[in-house]
Image (tube, rainbow, N blue to C red):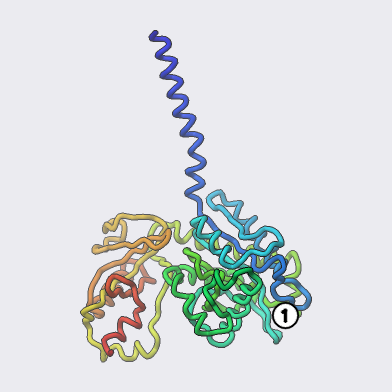
């Protein structure tokens, strides 16, 4: 009887250990950094046809190369909105990213212009739709007319209307800071690694990243309409260099948020010149505004204790998506928060910046400081 009981116990132990072994890879998979790569256009939507090249093909080649390189990292899971020449509706691209609970969404495209313009551009969501930025947004958003029932999916959105494009930036606003960090890294890698001309980071109301609930960018790897650049992007070596630059930028972004909270942060905010010039004439205390100093953003969930933040006390945190933002201090006195910012910088948080809250919601610093004059 005792022998039988021992066998039963051994069997149960082995079963338990085996179950742990089986579930371990699943748990590890859940911990991976998820990147959704979106090759623009596809299927009956060719994208632009500058110099006879097809945007949909070049975008797909670059996207697949980025994914292949990222998949070499065991900590990264890559999901594609398309891996072949098929048409995927814009709203479905965002749905794929949201269902995957992705950490990043990167949409890859090729540019076009009536002139011989050339260079790379990386877009984040925003309301700055004047001039050239609006034309890019209009061109990319007009893809919805190729979709069935687009009126239902986009609630009467009109790509030709500047007023219509302004509204779509609101939903992704909370992720814009991190999106800007990624966009800057991509453009920097285009310049330094791929040796391409960068036209910079831009903001536009783009439908493909409207409903993504994670940092998201749209990358224009160059102009197919430019004779030299179009030919370059149509080559395997050119596509590979652009892909490697995007891959390196994503890895740099991941490394930054994976690191323990230190002196670097994600996101910055600058005041416009008019606000800076009028600061001295504004009241110092804003009764309905709470100012804080954002010192860091990280994927790590740290206790808001002084030993985790170089001796700084009065630390608070808030979770935004998969990131934790850490703040130092809390006051309605703008002069005091500026002193707190100097204290943070002296501790090594050299890129810390002031943020403002009203009724528990974060607002722009410009809006907070100007509110006292209204």
Residue 31 or residue 266, whichever sits in front: 31
x and y, in percent, of residue 354 in the image: 33, 75
Left or right: where 201 falls relative to 110: left
Residue 75 or residue 131, whichever sits in front: 131
Q: Residue 9's image quarter?
A: top left
Residue 192 or residue 166, whichever sits in front: 166
Q: In the rendered image of this protein, does residue 356 appear above or below residue 114? A: above
Q: Is residue 250 visible?
A: yes
Q: Residue 68's image quarter?
A: bottom right
Residue corresponding to mark 1: 225
Among all residues in the image, which is located at the extreme right? 52
x and y, in percent, of residue 358 in the image: 28, 75
**Residue drawn at 66 percent across, 72 percent down:** 146
Q: Residue 36's image quarter?
A: bottom right
Are there few (<14), some (14-19), or many (20+) residues within 10 Å of tag 1?
Answer: many
Left or right: where 108 falls relative to 258: right
x and y, in percent, of residue 133 in the image: 56, 82
**Residue drawn at 72 percent across, 80 percent down:** 225
Left or right: where 5 falls relative to 190: left
Among all residues in the image, which is located at the extreme top? 1
Q: In the rendered image of this protein, does residue 84 appear above or below residue 234? A: above
User: Can you say which quadrant of the picture contains the N terminus?
Assistant: top left
User: Can you say which quadrant of the picture contains the C terminus?
Assistant: bottom left
């Amino acid at each position: 009887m005792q022998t039988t009981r021992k066998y039963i116990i051994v069997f149960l132990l082995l079963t338990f250990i085996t179950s742990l072994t089986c579930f371990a890879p699943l748990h590890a998979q859940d911990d991976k950094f998820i990147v959704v790569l979106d090759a623009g256009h596809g299927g009956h939507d060719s994208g632009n046809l500058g110099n006879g090249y097809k945007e949909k093909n070049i975008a797909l080649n670059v996207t697949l190369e980025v994914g292949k390189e990222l998949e070499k990292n065991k900590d990264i899971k890559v999901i594609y909105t398309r891996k072949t020449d098929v048409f995927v509706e814009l709203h479905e691209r965002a749905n794929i990213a949201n269902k995957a609970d992705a950490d990043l969404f990167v949409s890859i495209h090729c540019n076009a212009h009536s002139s011989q313009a050339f260079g790379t551009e990386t877009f984040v969501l925003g309301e700055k739709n004047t001039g050239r930025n609006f034309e890019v947004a209009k061109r990319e958003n007009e893809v919805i007319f190729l979709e069935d029932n687009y009126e239902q999916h986009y609630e009467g959105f009109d790509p030709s209307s500047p007023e219509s494009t302004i509204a779509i930036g609101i939903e992704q606003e909370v992720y814009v800071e991190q999106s800007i960090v990624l966009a800057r890294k991509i453009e920097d890698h285009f310049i330094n690694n791929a040796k391409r001309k960068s036209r910079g980071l831009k903001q536009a109301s783009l439908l493909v990243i409207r409903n993504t609930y994670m940092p998201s960018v749209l990358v224009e790897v160059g102009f197919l309409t430019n004779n030299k650049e179009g030919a370059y992007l149509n080559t395997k070596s050119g596509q590979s260099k652009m892909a490697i630059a995007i891959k390196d930028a994503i890895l740099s972004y991941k490394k930054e948020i994976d690191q323990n909270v230190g002196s670097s942060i994600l996101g910055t905010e600058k005041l416009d010149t008019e606000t800076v010039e009028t600061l001295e004439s504004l009241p110092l205390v804003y009764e309905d505004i709470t100012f804080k100093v954002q010192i860091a953003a990280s994927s790590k969930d740290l206790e808001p204790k002084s030993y985790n933040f170089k001796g700084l006390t009065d630390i608070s945190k808030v979770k935004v998506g998969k990131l934790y933002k850490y703040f130092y201090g809390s006051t309605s006195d703008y002069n005091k928060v500026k002193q707190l910012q100097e204290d943070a910088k002296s501790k090594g948080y050299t890129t810390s910046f002031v943020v403002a809250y009203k009724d528990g919601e974060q607002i722009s610093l410009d809006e907070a400081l100007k509110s006292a004059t209204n």
